[in-house]
Image (cartoon, rainbow, N blue to C red):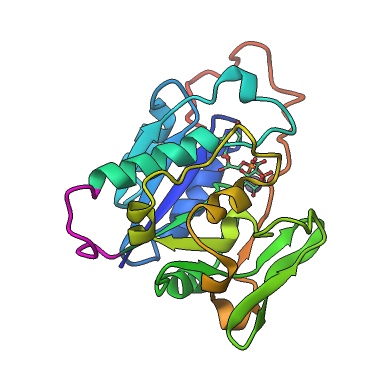
């Protein structure tokens, strides 16, 4: 099956660095289609040029986050992930069931992904789950597994979540996405940190989850976050003698 990676991304000083690191990973994965969704009013020059030379099958989308949702404490990238879902559904709408096997996962642009993760998620039948490192105020969060079934969650943060899992901790088969055409990320009624759980509730149950990464005992993806770039010494006006692509 093809792996579809939906990546929301937004303009900031480290954007190209993050996308470069991600592309270097994705380039080593067979049959990966990158759906890059810019949080912007249009497709930027920077991302367009970057994708053109990335050497990866890709789709370049954009949708701006409404200004009222750009506030600390509110979920990020809701509209961008939904745009990726809409593209997937539209692209596959005329295909007979199961003709195009695919697996979808949400790949934020700043995380760190091992290559083994892609081998694991490629065998997803409906919805698969695995541990995520450096998240929730712990070294890792993970699904608790007994006899090959998920029975709960190891987490230190909002333990009451039905699916106590980060965006980087699950994959969904394309068929599940197509047969649940209304499943989307919601702004209204979704508290901070509940986007993943609210989305998964629409498409699956705990009993149905497929544990990966050796019964969820191996961390294959890390929720790394990039430090805010220090531009304290950046001149107010362009002082360099030539135009630089950053
Ligand atoms: C955590 C989760 O890991 C994210 O999946 C979740 O979207 C996020 O919280 C949230 O608060 O909603 P965190 O590292 O705090 O992640 O979030 P970021 O990495 O800053 O953003 C997640 C993704 O959205 C990234 O791919 C980022 O490029 C994108 N983003 C962020 C936008 O498209 N627009 C923004 O204004 C901010
Ligand atoms: Mn992040």
Give the x, y percent position of residue 198.
Answer: 59, 48
Relative depth, front residue between 189 and 76: 189
Relative depth, front residue between 103 and 116: 103
Is residue 173 shown above or below 54? below
Which SS does the magenta portion mostly show? Answer: loop
Q: Quadrant of ligand 1?
A: top right
User: Quick check: 145 left or right of 244?
Assistant: right
Give the x, y percent position of residue 214.
Answer: 58, 83
The answer to whether residue 218 of the structure is visible from this angle is: no
Is residue 39 shown above or below 194? above
Give the x, y percent position of residue 85.
Answer: 39, 44
Determine the residue positioned at 59% across, 33% down: 187
User: Quick check: 234 left or right of 76?
Assistant: right
Q: Is residue 94 magenta?
A: yes
Determine the residue positioned at 55% across, 64% down: 205
Is residue 90 shown above or below 188? below
Magenta stretch: give its range: 92-101
The answer to whether residue 198 of the structure is visible from this angle is: yes
Relative depth, front residue between 19 and 176: 176
Relative depth, front residue between 200 and 134: 200
Q: Is residue 124 magenta?
A: no
User: Quick check: 141 left or right of 173?
Assistant: right
User: Quick check: 101 left or right of 186?
Assistant: left
């Amino acid at each position: 099956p093809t792996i579809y990676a939906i990546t929301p991304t937004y303009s900031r000083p480290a954007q190209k660095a993050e996308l470069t690191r991600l592309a270097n990973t994705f380039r080593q994965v067979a049959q990966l289609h990158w759906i890059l969704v810019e949080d912007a009013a249009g497709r930027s020059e920077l991302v367009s040029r970057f994708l053109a030379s990335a050497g990866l099958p890709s789709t370049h989308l954009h949708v701006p986050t409404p200004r009222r949702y750009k506030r600390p404490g509110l979920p990020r990238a809701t509209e961008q992930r939904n745009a990726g879902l809409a593209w997937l559904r539209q692209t596959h709408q005329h295909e007979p069931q199961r003709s195009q096997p695919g697996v979808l996962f949400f790949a934020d642009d700043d995380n760190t992904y091992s290559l083994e993760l892609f081998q694991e998620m490629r065998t997803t039948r409906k919805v698969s789950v695995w541990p995520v490192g450096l998240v929730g105020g712990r070294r890792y969060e993970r699904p608790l597994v007994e006899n090959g079934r998920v029975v709960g969650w190891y987490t230190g943060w909002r333990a009451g979540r039905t699916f106590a899992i980060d965006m980087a901790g699950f994959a969904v088969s394309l068929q599940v996405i197509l047969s649940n055409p209304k499943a989307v990320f919601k702004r209204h009624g979704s508290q901070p940190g509940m986007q993943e759980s609210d989305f998964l509730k629409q498409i699956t149950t705990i009993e149905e989850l497929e544990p990966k990464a050796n019964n969820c005992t191996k961390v294959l993806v890390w929720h790394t976050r990039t430090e805010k770039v220090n531009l304290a010494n950046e001149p107010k006006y362009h002082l360099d003698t030539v135009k630089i692509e950053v």
